[in-house]
Image (tube, grey):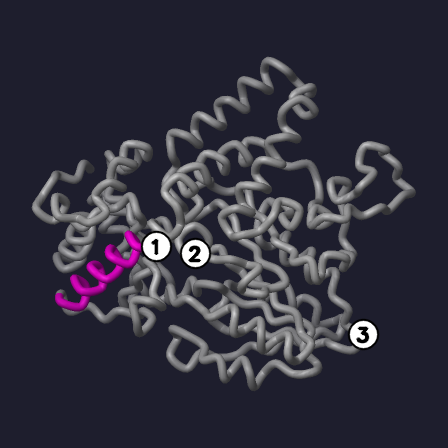
Amino acid sequence: MQTHTTEASRTDPHRDLLAYRDEFPILSRKTFLNTCSLGAVSRRSMAGVQEFLELWAEMGASAWYELWVGKLAELRAAYGRVIGATPDRIALTPNISVAVTGVASALDHSTRKKIVMSDLDFPTVGHQFLAKGTQGVRAEIIRSPDRVTVPLELFDAAIDEETALVVTSHVYFTSGAIQDIKALARIAHERGALILVDAYQGTGQVPIDVVDAGVDFYTSGSLKWLLGGPGSAFLYVSPGVGQMEPTIAGWWGMSNQFDFNISSLQWRQEATRYEMGTPAMAAVYAALGGLSIIEEIGVERIRERDIALTEDLIARAQAAGFTTRTAPTPEQRTPIVLLEFEDPRPAVAALAQRGIIVDSRPGLVRISPYFYNTIEENEVVIEALKSL
């Protein structure tokens, strides 16, 4: 679905970013407002995957040593630049679940058995530590009073001398609210606990300097706002916890990887000790394509654009009579806008029939514009919902 130029687009302060629309084929056919679930694929990512296939066909296994190991280093560096970290502090993983599993395996629960999280965090976090209940690990889940945010004082009350790890989101997938992870890190460290941040809904659209934030671990991936699709994620490991040893291991995490010695366990000194098996190179090429666009625009600029789109969408939704579930201020909000519906699935399906792509969560229609979307597309989706 092409979006025609209107007065709104002509006066759009970020209209230069609309030049990127041609980079994403889906935008010419659909009103795509679902980056929160899966970022639109770019021509760069498609070209990258095609390059990988051609190299595979031409070079075979020699591509590993001559090119692909270098591409892995390139990806670590690109992820690091987006979050303010050096490449040696970045480990590549296929998804966040594997990253969290690696950290969980490295924790010492001899004296600290409690893990603190919230009920707004993604289920994989809870599942990871609930599954360790037979090992004496206890997950304490803080309940959000409004289903939007979790006040810092609730974390403050929950984190104590028994807490091994605070694991929570930078941006809640359930509300789009941004957490103050720097304040959370300070509270955790005052009690002797570590902090792991799930940033899947933040990286690429919310500026972050992980060193300044003081977090111990920070994990994210390319599926959503980094526009690289599934299969590529990363784990930042701060220098202060860099020598912790996981109790799950793979040959890519070994400093003597190419000795092929089954009886030797020699961890890498870098964060790559958390890497496991052979990487999926097609996903690496796709991820690099998406990251090149994010770096080209800059996360600060993307954030400016997203605030404008988000505030416009919320205003239109509320004017149309919809109840929104969002953080209280623009500074706390991201372009994850939730509208309350008793049963959202028929509405999402009806919109899809009209070429409008959004998503649902229990009791909610979830709309997530990104820098490549337009003010007109906000209007399109709200008018369509009104007509259902």
Kindly tell me whether residue 347 is visible in this rendering: no
- Amino acid marked by disc 1: Arg
Q: Which residue is drawn at the image coordinates 54% and 45% (left, top)?
A: 79
Q: Nearer the viewer, residue 124 or 176?
A: 176
Secondary element under disc 1, as helix, strand or loop, is helix
Circle 1 residue: 303
* Residue 14 locus on image (x, y percent): 23, 47
Q: Which residue is drawn at the image coordinates 41% and 74% (left, top)?
A: 149
Circle 3 residue: 110
- Amino acid marked by disc 3: Ser
Camera-nearest label, 3 or 2:
2
Circle 2 residue: 207
* Residue 1 locus on image (x, y percent): 20, 37
Question: Start and end of the magenta stretch?
Answer: 303-319
Q: Nearer the viewer, residue 231 or 329?
A: 329
Q: Calculate the distance from the C-alpha at mark 3 to the C-alpha at mark 1.
A: 42 Å
* 318 in the magenta segment: yes
Figure check: 211 above or below 14:
below
